[in-house]
Structures are given as C-alpha cells and as structure tokens.
Amino acid sequence: MGSLAEAAGKFAEKMADVLDVFDLSFFVAGSASLGALLVWLSQNGVELPEGLSAERALVAVIAAYILGLVTYALGRWVRRQALEPLLGDNSGCMSELYDVHHLGRIPGLSQYVTKSSGEQTTVSGGLYSRLWVLVRTEVGLRETYSLVRRYWILSATYDGIGFAALLWLLPVWYFDTGIILRVVLSVLLVSAALVAWRQASMYHRYQIEELAATAAYWHTEGDTPPPVDDPGIGVDQEG
C-alpha cells in the first residue's frame, strides 16, 4: 500500500511538472495574437474555415499556445532592449539591494560582485539565478518560491500581451473606417502595449526585491540549502 501511495505521489509530481511547462498564462497573449492574425488574414482575402470541429479547436489551441510563447519571447526582447530605461531600469536594482540587505555577509555571494574605484557595487546577472536556486531548493522557502515564480509568470504574461497589442495594429489599419478612428485605435493599442510592458518590468522588480530580502532573512534564520537538483523556472538571467 505504501508503494502504491509513493507511486501515486511521484505521478502527481510529474503531472505538476507537465502543467508547469504548459503554463496556461501563455494562452492569454497567444489567443489575442491569434485573433489579430485571423482578422488580418480575412481582410486580405484569405478564406478561413467556418464552423467549429474538434480538429479545428485542437489546431486553435496549439496555435494559441505557440503564439503565446513567441509573443512572450519577442515582447521580453523588446522590453529589455528598448524600453527598460523608459519603463523603469532594473539593471541596478540588485546592486542596490545587495548593499541594503548586506548580502555580502552570506558565504558564496561575493563572487558575483565587483567594486569600482568609487566603491560602487556592481552585481552580475549570476546572482539573480543563484538566489532562485536558494528559494527553489531550501524547504523552508517554498512559499517564497511560489511567490516569486508567480511574479515571473505574470511578468512573462505581460511581456506577451504587450507584443500582442502591437499585432492588432495590422488589422486596425485595414478597417474600412476613417483615418481619425484608426489613429485613435492605434494610439490606444500602443498605450496598452506600453502599460503591459511597464507592468512586466514591475513584476520583474518584485522578483528581485523578494529574492534579495529572502536571502537576507534566510541567512539569519535558516541553514545551508541542499544541493541543486534541477534548473527550474525563473533563471533566464533577467537580473
């Protein structure tokens, strides 16, 4: 009976891992992007199949998920490369929190830090991944891991939504309406994209702040974490 319960527990863990990979949050931006592309194709004379069948529903779900992953990747690239200074630069956040929380007293973290001639702290992106390892592997920090993982997912979702909003510019400029309405709709879509990317940047900052504060608390209250067993989510070097 014990073996059966253990096997069932392992099966449940594997199913949870599968659901982590196929996170439903990617369907939000993916569905919006799919809608924009279908409207645009229809406007350009492409005949789309009518009616809903099991095969078409399956294709739509797969297409929405793939588009969700693509818009997430493109949206995050745009935010990192072009918009971080405008929406809120997180590049110095970890360096600031490193000093505020005195993370230098934690063994092994100083290797990610360099000091300039003016004693200014510069932290490499490796510290961000190192702190993810801490909250993922330390049993007592499971709640923090769930929280920062949720922040990571929300940041990814808003990155995708930002790019999906821009995709809707394609069908908007094919609408058979006046130029003023199309300009107004375009301004609203661009504004929505910027708001989404701003929110994505904020959630990334929340991750950094939570990870740094948790490391400071763990060093005071906890023990040395166990060895790392897998890379997990949230170590995409956005630190």
Image (spheres, rainbow, N blue to C red):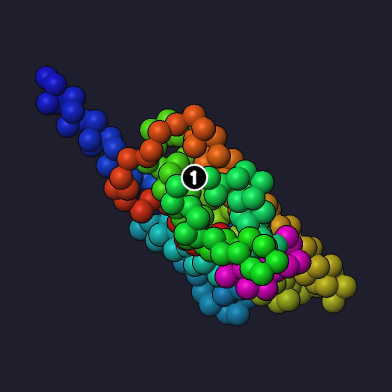
Q: In percent of the image, x 60 and y 51: which residue is there?
A: 98
Q: Residue at x 60, y 60 (%)?
A: 159
Q: Magenta stretch: residue 87 in it?
A: yes
Task: Give x and y (percent) for residue 195.
Answer: 73, 57
Tell me the element at label 1. Answer: loop
Quarter-wise, where is residue 6 in the image? top left
Q: Is residue 24 visible?
A: no
- Residue 227 is left or right of residue 34, and the answer is left
Report the residue at 63% width, 57% height from top: 95
| The one of 158 and 67 positioned closer to us in this rendering | 158
Q: Farthest residue in the right direction?
A: 180
Is residue 215 rendered to the left or right of residue 159? left
Please say if 65 is above or below 219: below
* Quarter placement of the C terminus: bottom right
Asked if residue 66 can be seen in this view, the reply is yes
Residue position for label 1 = 106
Q: Is residue 123 magenta?
A: no
Rendering coords of residue 202 (x, y %): 67, 52
Main secondary structure of the magenta stretch: helix
Magenta-tinted stretch: 75-88
Q: Is residue 196 left or right of residue 48?
A: right
Say left or right for 80 vs 226.
Answer: right
The amino acid sitting under disc 1 is Ile
In the displayed structure, would residue 200 be above or below residue 107? Answer: below
At 55% across and 39% down in the image, what residue appears? Answer: 216
Q: Quadrant of the N terminus?
A: top left
**Residue 31 image position (x, y, % from top left):** 54, 57
Q: Quadrant of residue 88?
A: bottom right
Q: Nearer the viewer, residue 11 or 174?
A: 11
